[in-house]
Amino acid sequence: MFGNSIQCGVAEPSFLYLMMAAAYFRQASHTRHPHVRGALRDLGREYLTNAHRVVPAYACPASGLHPLISNSQS
């Protein structure tokens, strides 16, 4: 029923990684220490870069087998 609404191959950024990146950028903008500010910005950039690399949990499996159902049953 709902399986047809999810499109395979559509890359969406990870919401968690985007929120983590935003948190690090926010902390960086409020710190007084320059070396900490740079480290926090680097961490934010890393999360932002990796947000597009994370495979969502609902992604279609490449083998065509359902990840939650035992495929040994026929």
Image (cartoon, rainbow, N blue to C red):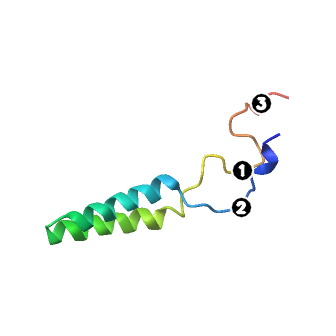
Which is more foreground, mark 2 or mark 3?
2
Residue visible at 27% across and 61% down in the picture: 27
SS state under label 1: loop
Relative to 3, say whether 8 is above or below.
below
Q: Position of residue 14 (x, y in %)?
A: 53, 56
Question: Circle 3 — which element?
Answer: loop
Mark earlier in primary sequence (3, 1): 1
Residue assigned mark 1:
60
Instruction: Name, please, the residue furthest toward the right.
Output: 74
| Residue situated in front as seen by the camera: 28 or 71 | 28
Q: Residues within 10 Å of mark 1 (few under 14, many from 20)?
A: some
Where is residue 72 drawn, in percent x and y?
77, 30
The mark that comes first in sequence, 2 or 1, is 2
- Which residue is pictured at 69% across the width and 62% down the height? 10
- Using residue 15 as the reference point, say whether residue 21 is left or right of it: left
Please tell me the numbered disc located at residue 72: 3
Residue 1 is left or right of residue 44, and the answer is right
Residues under numbered marks 2 and 1 in contact, where contact means CB atoms less than 8 Å apart: yes
Where residue 45 appears, as percent x and y from the top left, is 38, 68
Residue closest to the eye, 54 or 63: 54
Q: Quadrant of the C terminus?
A: top right
Q: CA distance from mark 2 to mark 3?
A: 26 Å
- Residue occupying image coordinates x 82% and y 48%: 4
Residue 1, image x and y in percent?
83, 39
Q: Which mark is residue 9?
A: 2
Q: Residue type at mark 3: give it.
A: Ser
Q: Earlier in the sequence, mark 2 or mark 3?
A: 2
User: Is residue 45 toward the left or the right of residue 61 in the image?
Assistant: left
Is disc 2 placed on a helix, strand or loop?
loop
Label 2 is placed on what type of residue? Gly
